[in-house]
């Protein structure tokens, strides 16, 4: 087989190619869809000046003069070619409403906070969910199982932004258990970033509410999935054989039941990482948390097209990369599966 | 002797320590802003962190306006005068004022401020052609087009003055380009504007009583600290102003947790009720504007004034106001297109008496339509003399809860009367585009303006969404009209004339003509006037809020914030522990 044929039949190569194609399609669609949205940055800025500063229409229109340098009437094809050419060079462009600010700089300022809060919450939610789900499966039909399953069903049915607001109002305002104002944002004013206990503690205390919201809103799903997966595994022949062989219960639980029940959840775990990035917009807005979702919300409100395009692209890439990693790691976790039928 | 001096010194020390301990305190407010890297400190460019009403505490203006008395409160200016012979408005500046970087405030700063405004087409440049520093503390504004002193005064005195040390480099380039005859639409000026848009000062340097230090800024809050070198520092009672970032949904829990002393966000009536139950006071300053029904005059029979009058009679405006925003909405009484709060200042008693209030009278509305040859069909819907059913759509920005409620209620009342009205909500960002393009039958849009001069209200009422705006046909209401009250009028010309010349009495006459014509023609039907529902927390950190009815609350909530005035003149005080 020639090197070329080997290359194009290579599973990883094909997956990379497919990922690039998906990113290209999403970038193209995003470019046109954001421009189809009602309103434009100038109209919105004028409206904002009128409502926030009590300006008359003509004064607001004059004040918005800076935005008139944006050529929104340039042919779409021309704008698209420039956008794609810049994108190939890794250049997301410059913010419309904050002239001179590179979008890449904004992304680098926001993305780490979302990765941090979403990453920690997925880790906690997954660990907690599979533990409780497995316990429910083992204690199937018990009061514990009934209570846990009901809670899980309720939690997974409530949208995450609602949980965020409830946490804020009930725990923060009504019960007064947390200082609502001090916990907003990512860090307290005046705290110097660095690998110091004060900074780390501060960062975690600010991330607590977003993390709690993500955990509470996703843990139910993990519990129910794990319970169902465990129940299926418990009925497998190899578990019965392991029990018949007199293997210790702990070994059966972890090495036979746990490991196999976990496999179907693994793909969901990596995918969740990507989707939570997109879903972070509302949560980060509620807690004024400077992440990528917050940037997305603000850019949509202002119709800052370059920022919107970049954030949508980042979310897409996150989902694609997560999916890709899941595929690659799946074969490592399950020896029965080999990439490319090797 | 030595002992006496020592004892006196120790007493003085104790007194100063005690007084410094008693002074201070913190005021907590809220205002939405974008933190860096999106937000920045170039206060001319978009997304600058200027903090709305609190901007006046950092980059101070020359003066602020007291709406009830019609008088100015001098700040960086001490006095001003108009020379009618030379068409020059002269401003005398306060001496001894320091910038927060230690430099001295002079006329050069004022000149820089306004020439950079030229770069951004500031409205004042429609009237002036030159700003000159006569000496270090005197500035002349030369008028190329004579306009009403009230209009010019406002443009000059209410502008936040920027530092020449920060912005001077760019202002001198604007002056040089103007000297070469380059106007704001020239390529050179556009290039300079593009360059200046990207200018990012490290911090905002002002002359105001509070310093905006980027170190005290996060995405969730910003703390302004007292500037000890402020020219009127002894009046300032607070050491810190903390401002929480966010729009209504994120600020609401903070108000409920009593972390905010004052907020101007538009809270829904249900939230307001909860604030009141929690003992939080609600202040309702007038906004001098509100929602109105705009008609597409291309559509028959909206081009008939009698039909618009009938619609005004068919709507119980008190009900519409109450269901929309509770106590923060008041029905329009005089129906002049001008805030009822401004009517006594602009219209004589005799003219006020001639105004039709259009009190709810469905029988009269029916009589008017019948007289036009309209008939009610068997289904209860009016049919025009041309045989078309009166069935229309009312367009409203869906996100504006109060306007949406006003639209729903108006539609319900009109349908009950026999004009079948269906509400269509569209996103707020698309709404002005649709109205300006004339793609509507009836629409809810804003009337009035938060400006003491009536010119601006009529501009909003009759031009903003009409063909002279140049942005589309809009409601397409012909501005040359024949009226019973004032004869034949060119409303466009009257609006321009209302802000021209030095003679205020003459301007009032023009405004009276506009008011009477508006009242008869009703090109739009104002539903109610919007008042703020601003929570003000008394006794937690801040105290001494004046009682309801105090003239200070006649100030517009945004244009000349009474809270800022009360911080500057020392009315608001910290709670002493």
Image (spheres, rainbow, N blue to C red):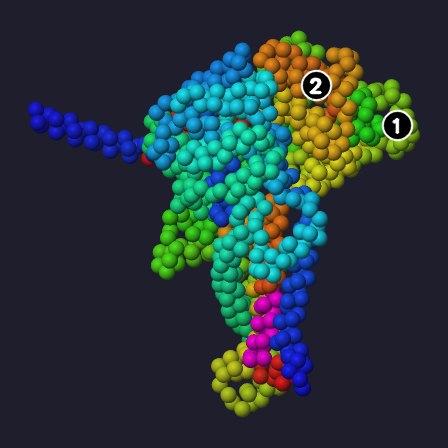
Kindly give the residue lying farthest to the front in the view shown: B180
Residue at left 58%, top 60%?
Answer: A89
Q: Is residue A325 above or below residue B40?
A: below
Q: Quadrant of residue B449?
A: top right
Q: Is residue A115 above or below residue B100?
A: below
Residue A305 pos. (x, y %): 62, 49
Q: Which residues are magenta?
A: A319-333
Q: Is residue A77 magenta?
A: no
Q: Chain of mark 2?
A: B
SS at badge 1: loop
| Numbered mark located on residue A313 in the image | none
Residue B203 pos. (x, y %): 42, 41
For the question of whether residue B331 can be seen, the reply is no
* Image side of residue B399 versus residue A190, left or right: right
Please state which of residues B401 and B468 is positioned toward the viewer in this rendering. B468
C-alpha gap between disc 2 and disc 1: 33 Å
* Image side of residue B228 versus residue B244, left or right: left
* Image side of residue A304 versus residue B359, left or right: left
Q: Are marks 2 and 1 on the same chain?
A: yes
Q: Quadrant of residue B529?
A: top right
Q: Which residue is mark 1?
A: B384
Residue at left 51%, top 88%?
Answer: A247
Kindly give the residue lying farthest to the bottom in the view shown: A245
Which badge, 2 or 1, is on the more N-terminal residue? 1
Please state which of residues B459 and B96 is positioned toward the viewer in this rendering. B96
Q: Which residue is mark 2?
A: B493
Magenta region, main secondary structure: helix
SS at badge 2: helix
Badge 1 local density, few (<14 within 10 Å), some, or many (20+)? Answer: some
* Image side of residue A57 versus residue B485, left or right: left
Residue at left 20%, top 28%?
Answer: B12
């Amino acid at each position: 087989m020639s090197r070329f044929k080997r290359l194009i039949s290579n599973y990883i190569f094909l997956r990379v190619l497919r990922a690039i194609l998906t990113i290209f399609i999403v970038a193209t669609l995003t470019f046109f869809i954001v421009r189809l949205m009602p309103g434009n940055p100038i109209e919105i800025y004028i409206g904002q000046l009128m409502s926030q500063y009590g300006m008359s229409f003509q004064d607001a229109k004059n004040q918005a003069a800076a935005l008139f340098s944006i050529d929104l009437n340039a042919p779409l094809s021309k704008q698209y070619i420039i956008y794609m050419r810049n994108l190939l060079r890794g250049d997301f462009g410059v913010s419309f409403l904050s002239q001179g600010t590179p979008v890449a700089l904004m992304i680098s300022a926001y993305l780490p906070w979302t990765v941090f809060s979403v990453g920690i919450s997925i880790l906690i939610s997954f660990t907690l969910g599979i533990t409780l789900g497995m316990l429910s499966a083992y204690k199937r039909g018990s009061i514990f199982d009934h209570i846990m399953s009901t809670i899980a069903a309720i939690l997974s049915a409530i949208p995450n932004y609602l949980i965020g607001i409830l946490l804020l109002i009930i725990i923060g305002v009504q019960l007064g258990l947390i200082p609502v104002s001090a916990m907003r944002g990512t860090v307290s004013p005046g705290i110097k970033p660095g690998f110091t206990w004060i900074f780390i503690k501060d960062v975690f205390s600010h991330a607590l509410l977003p993390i709690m919201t993500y955990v509470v809103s996703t843990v139910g799903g993990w519990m129910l999935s794990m319970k169902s997966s465990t129940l299926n595994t418990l009925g497998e022949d190899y578990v019965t054989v392991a029990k018949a062989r007199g293997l210790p219960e702990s070994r059966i639980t972890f090495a036979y039941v746990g490991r196999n029940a976990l496999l179907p959840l693994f793909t969901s775990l990596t995918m969740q990482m990507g989707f939570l990035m997109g879903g972070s917009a509302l949560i980060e807005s509620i807690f004024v948390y400077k992440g990528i979702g917050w940037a997305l919300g603000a850019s949509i409100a202002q119709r800052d097209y370059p920022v919107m395009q970049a954030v949508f692209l980042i979310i897409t890439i996150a989902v694609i990369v997560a999916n890709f990693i899941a595929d690659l790691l799946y074969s490592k976790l399950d020896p029965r599966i080999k990439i490319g039928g090797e | 002797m030595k002992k006496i001096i020592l004892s006196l010194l120790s007493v003085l020390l104790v007194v100063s320590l005690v007084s410094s301990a008693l002074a201070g305190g913190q005021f907590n407010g809220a205002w939405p802003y974008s933190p860096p890297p999106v937000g920045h400190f170039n206060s001319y460019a978009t997304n600058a962190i200027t903090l709305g009403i609190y901007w006046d505490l950092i980059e101070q203006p020359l003066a602020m306006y007291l709406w009830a008395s019609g008088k100015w409160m001098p700040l960086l200016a001490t006095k001003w005068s108009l020379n009618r012979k030379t068409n020059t408005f002269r401003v005398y500046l306060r001496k001894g004022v320091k910038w927060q970087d230690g430099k001295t405030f002079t006329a050069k700063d004022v000149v820089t401020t306004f020439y950079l405004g030229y770069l951004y087409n500031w409205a004042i440049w429609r009237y002036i052609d030159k700003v000159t520093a006569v000496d270090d503390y005197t500035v002349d504004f030369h008028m190329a087009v004579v306009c009403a002193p009230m209009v010019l005064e406002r443009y000059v005195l209410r502008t936040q003055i920027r530092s020449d040390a920060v912005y001077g480099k760019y202002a001198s380039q604007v002056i040089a380009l103007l000297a070469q005859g380059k106007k704001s639409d020239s390529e050179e000026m556009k290039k300079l504007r593009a360059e200046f848009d990207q200018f990012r000062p490290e911090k905002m340097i002002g002359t105001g009583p509070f310093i905006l230090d980027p170190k005290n800024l996060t995405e969730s809050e910003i703390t302004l600290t007292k500037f000890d070198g402020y020219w009127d520092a002894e009046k300032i009672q607070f050491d810190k102003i903390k401002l929480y970032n966010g729009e209504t949904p994120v600020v609401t829990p903070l108000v409920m947790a009593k972390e905010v002393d004052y907020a101007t966000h538009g809270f829904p009536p249900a939230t307001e009720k909860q604030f009141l139950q929690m003992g939080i006071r609600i202040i309702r300053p007038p906004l001098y504007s509100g929602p109105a029904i705009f008609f597409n005059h291309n559509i028959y029979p909206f081009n008939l004034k009698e039909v618009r009058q009938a619609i005004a009679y068919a709507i119980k405006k008190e009900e519409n106001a109450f269901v929309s925003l509770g106590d923060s909405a008041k029905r329009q009484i005089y129906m002049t297109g001008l805030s009822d709060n401004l009517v006594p200042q602009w219209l004589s008693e005799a003219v006020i008496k001639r105004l039709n209030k259009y009190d709810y009278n469905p029988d009269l509305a029916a009589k008017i339509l019948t007289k036009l040859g309209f008939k009610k069909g068997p289904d209860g819907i009016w049919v025009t003399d041309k045989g078309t059913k009166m069935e229309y759509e009312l367009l409203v920005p869906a996100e504006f809860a109060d306007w949406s409620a006003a639209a729903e209620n108006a539609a319900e009342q009109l349908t009950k009367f026999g004009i079948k009205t269906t509400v269509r909500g569209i996103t707020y960002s698309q709404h002005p585009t649709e109205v300006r393009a004339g793609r509507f039958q009836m629409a809810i849009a804003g009337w009035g303006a938060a400006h003491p001069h009536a010119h601006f209200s009529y501009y909003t009422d009759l031009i903003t969404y009409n063909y002279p705006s140049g942005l589309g046909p809009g409601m397409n209401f012909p501005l040359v009209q024949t009226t019973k009250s004032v004869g034949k009028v060119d409303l466009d010309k009257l609006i321009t004339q209302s802000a021209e010349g030095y003679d205020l009495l003459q301007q009032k006459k023009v405004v009276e003509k506009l008011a009477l014509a508006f009242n008869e023609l009703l090109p739009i039907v104002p539903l109610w006037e919007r008042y703020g529902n601003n929570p003000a927390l008394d006794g937690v950190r801040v105290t001494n809020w004046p009682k309801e009815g105090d003239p200070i609350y006649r100030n517009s909530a945004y244009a000349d914030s009474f809270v800022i005035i009360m911080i500057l003149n020392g009315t608001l005080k910290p709670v002493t522990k």
